[in-house]
Structure formats: C-alpha cells, structure tokens
Image: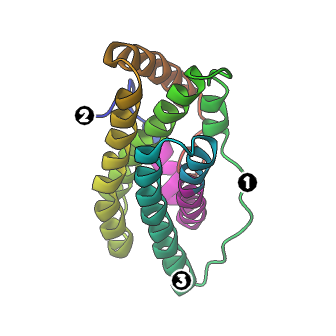
C-alpha cells in the first residue's frame, strides 16, 4: 500500500524510547506542519477546487491531531518547545522541481511520501512502547495517515498521467529511502 522503499532502522525506536517526550513534542510540530502544507497548496493553486476541498479536510484533521497531542503534552506537564525543524523533510523538498507543472506534482508526491513514512513510524511506535495512552493514539492515527498518503497520490493522478505519477513517485521514494538510511536516529518523528 505504501510507497516506501525501505524500513525505518531499528535503532530509531530505541532512541525514541529513551526520550519519548521529545518525540511527542516533535509529533505535535509535525501535525502542525502537515496542516501548513495543506494551506500552502491551497495558496499556491487556488484555482484547483478539488485540491482546495481535499486540503481543507486535511487541515482540519491535522489540526485536530495537533490539538490531541498538545492535550496529552499538557496533561503530562510537558511544554511545547520551539520547532527545531526537520532535516528529513528539508532533504526531501530539496528534490522538488522548481518549475511548474512539475513542482505541483512533486509537492503532492513528497507530501504523500512524508505521510507514508509518518504512518510507518506511528505503527512502529504503537508496537514498541508500553504507554497505553500513546499506543491508542498511534493506533488511531495510523489509518488517517495512510489515507492522507493515498489522497495525495490520487490527487496527483487527477492532474497528471498515471505512468508519470508512478515513475516520479518511484524516483522520489528511492531518494527518500536514501535519506532514511542516513538519518541519525534521534527521538523525533522523522529522526
């Protein structure tokens, strides 16, 4: 179902287990940035009505996820700290074409790949941590993230030839795999 070309390294979950609060804070930021991606796509392509409707749904869901994670942080006395950025996402977007319409295709596919990787990471978290509240959260978020991945690919296929979408998705997924293999295994959602 997912386009991922490699699995997360096992060392990542070990780093997360050592500092779960940092991962939770980063997760909140990731949800917020996913909503911002939806807004960015609406702002850049306002004439694409179907995109605007899909992104408005995405924005609502992602802000809802942000709110849920924020409530858990607050309940645990963990303050949301400044967002330190995401080298994984920056590296992926470095591969985005700068000229239209290829930029639009790449933006959709890169957003989808990020959702796919988040989906995989949520499943790893659910299966490997003992915290019951967080296990339930990650279990509940998993299908939504998978749906977001599929929605981005479907949108790409609405605007571009299926063969072109599949070819470019394969190229970007290979690049994403090279990024994942080089990640330092820090306790962040994409670390």
In this picture, residue 51 sits left or right of residue 87: left
Spot occupied by residue 124 in the image (x, y as percentages of width and height): 35, 49
Q: Which residue is mark 3?
A: 76
The stretch in magenta equals 12-35
| Quarter that holds the N terminus | top left
Magenta-span inclusion, residue 28? yes
Q: Secondary structure at mark 3?
A: loop
Residue 9 in view, yes or no: no
Q: Secondary structure at mark 2?
A: loop
Q: Residue at x 45, y 70 (%)?
A: 64
Considering depth in this image, is 188 or 50 the residue closer to the camera?
50
* Residue contact at pointers 1 and 3, CB within 8 angstroms: no
Residue 84: numbered disc:
1
- Mark with earlier residue (2, 1): 2
Spot occupied by residue 58 in the image (x, y as percentages of width and height): 43, 56
In this picture, residue 46 sits left or right of residue 114: right
**Dot in front, 2 or 3:** 2
The answer to whether residue 174 is above or below residue 11 is above
Considering depth in this image, is 147 or 178 the residue closer to the camera?
147
Q: Residues within 10 Å of mark 1 (few under 14, many from 20)?
A: few
Q: Quadrant of residue 169?
A: top left
């Amino acid at each position: 179902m997912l386009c991922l070309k490699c699995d997360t390294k096992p060392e990542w979950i070990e780093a997360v287990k050592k500092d779960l609060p940092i991962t939770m804070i980063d997760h909140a930021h990731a949800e917020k940035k996913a909503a911002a991606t939806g807004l960015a796509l609406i702002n850049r392509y306002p004439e694409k009505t179907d995109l605007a409707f899909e992104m408005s749904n995405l924005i609502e869901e992602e802000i809802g996820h942000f709110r849920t994670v924020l409530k858990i942080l607050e309940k645990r006395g963990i303050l949301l700290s400044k967002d330190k950025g995401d080298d994984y996402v920056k590296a992926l977007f470095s591969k985005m074409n700068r000229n239209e319409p290829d930029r639009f295709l790449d933006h959709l596919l890169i957003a989808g790949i990020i959702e796919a990787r988040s989906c995989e990471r949520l499943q790893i978290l659910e299966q490997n941590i003992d915290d019951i509240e967080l296990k339930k959260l990650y279990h509940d978020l998993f299908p939504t993230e998978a749906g977001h991945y599929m929605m981005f690919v479907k949108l790409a296929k609405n605007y571009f030839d299926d063969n072109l979408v599949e070819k470019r998705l394969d190229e970007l997924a290979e690049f994403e795999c090279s990024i994942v293999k080089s990640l330092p295994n820090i306790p962040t959602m994409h670390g």
